[in-house]
Image: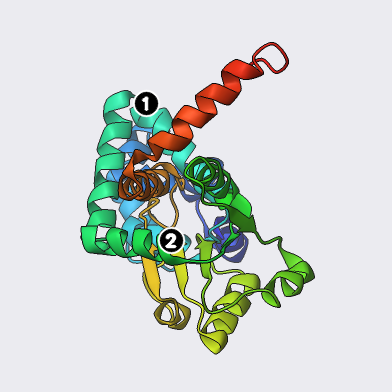
Amino acid sequence: MLQEIYEKYKESLSKSDHKIFGYLLEHEQELPMVTTAELSAQLGISTATISRFWSKIGYKNLNELKKAVYENQETTPFSRMNAALSQWEKVGISPDMIISRMSLHMEKTFRSVTPAMMDQAVDMILKAEHIYLFAPDASGGLGYIMQYRLMRLGIRLIPIPAGSQIYDFMVNIKKEDLLLLFGYSRLLTEVQVLISHSREIGCPAILFTDLMAGDLLSQADLVLYSCRGEPNDYHSMAVPMLLLDMIIMKTSQALGGGLERARELERLREKYAGMIRR
């Protein structure tokens, strides 16, 4: 966007103006953190000259330009990571910074997700005859961990692949079953199809997402929201994983901790230890 603005106004800019714009173009990713004082210090140009510059390119001030660039910027994984790296270069990455960020994400998450909602999720899992799982893209890791942990409790999840293969699974889904769906940043077409089908046949569906609004959310029987960061920020999976861990632990607790299966697991490991090493 800055390049387009420059091409539009470059013929009418002074030498100092070109110097300011050159700096902005070279530091476009850092624009949210740029200040008039910083520009003045870096370029050796007075703040008065910098203040007059913004009106020459169609903006009242620096903040108005920042807002326009932010709203125009396409939110992609690359742009989010770039913005995060730019911020981290300035403030550094430290345990305190990570903990502070995660604390904020957890606070937002658990203002939306109540203990009763987690209990409801556990109840739905325990009552289901079969459980189907759709965990695409970044949520694939969460889906795998959920499969792995629940399998130890005797609960088998049936993963649904993306694409047209979902139809082969949909024909087997019944109202006594349960759909576990993941959709972060956006809801894939497959999620929309599966939710629509679940309502048609009366099969309950749980949706794990970082979206707080949308017509489709109201169609899921239970929506478990996780905050992963601001729209233009690096999107962490730490809090979604924490929420999932809590549901897994509550499920284990409801089943008495899975002690009987844990003992059988240990017996099998000891029996075949010489053949398959851990």
Numbered marks: total? 2
Where the C terminus falls, by quadrant?
A: top right
The type of residue carrying mark 2 is: Ile
Residue identifier under label 2: 125
How would you rate the neighbour count of disc 1 (Cα within 10 Å): few for under 14, some for 14-19, many for 20 or more?
few
Q: Looking at the picture, how far across and down is residue 168, in whole percent?
A: 76, 71
Give the secondary structure at mark 2: helix
Q: Is residue 202 above or below residue 144?
A: below
Give the secondary structure at mark 1: loop
User: In the image, 168: left or right of 178?
Assistant: right
Of the numbered discs 2 and 1, the one sitting upstream in the chain is: 1
Report how far apart the C-alphas of labels 2 and 1 lie in the structure. Answer: 42 Å
Name the foreground residue: 67 vs 277: 277
Identify the residue at horizontal 69%, vertical 11% (top origin).
274
The type of residue carrying mark 1 is: Gly
Q: How is the image coloured?
A: rainbow
User: In the image, 40: left or right of 136?
Assistant: left
Name the foreground residue: 67 vs 100: 100
Residue identifier under label 1: 92
Cβ atoms under marks 2 and 1 closer than 8 Å:
no
Rendering quarter of residue 3: bottom right
Identify the residue at horizontal 39%, vertical 57% (top origin).
66
User: In the image, 226: left or right of 132?
Assistant: left
| Residue 19 in view (yes/no) | no
Where the N terminus falls, by quadrant?
A: bottom right
Q: Looking at the picture, how far across and down is residue 105, in whole percent?
A: 30, 48
Q: Is residue 124 above or below residue 13?
A: below
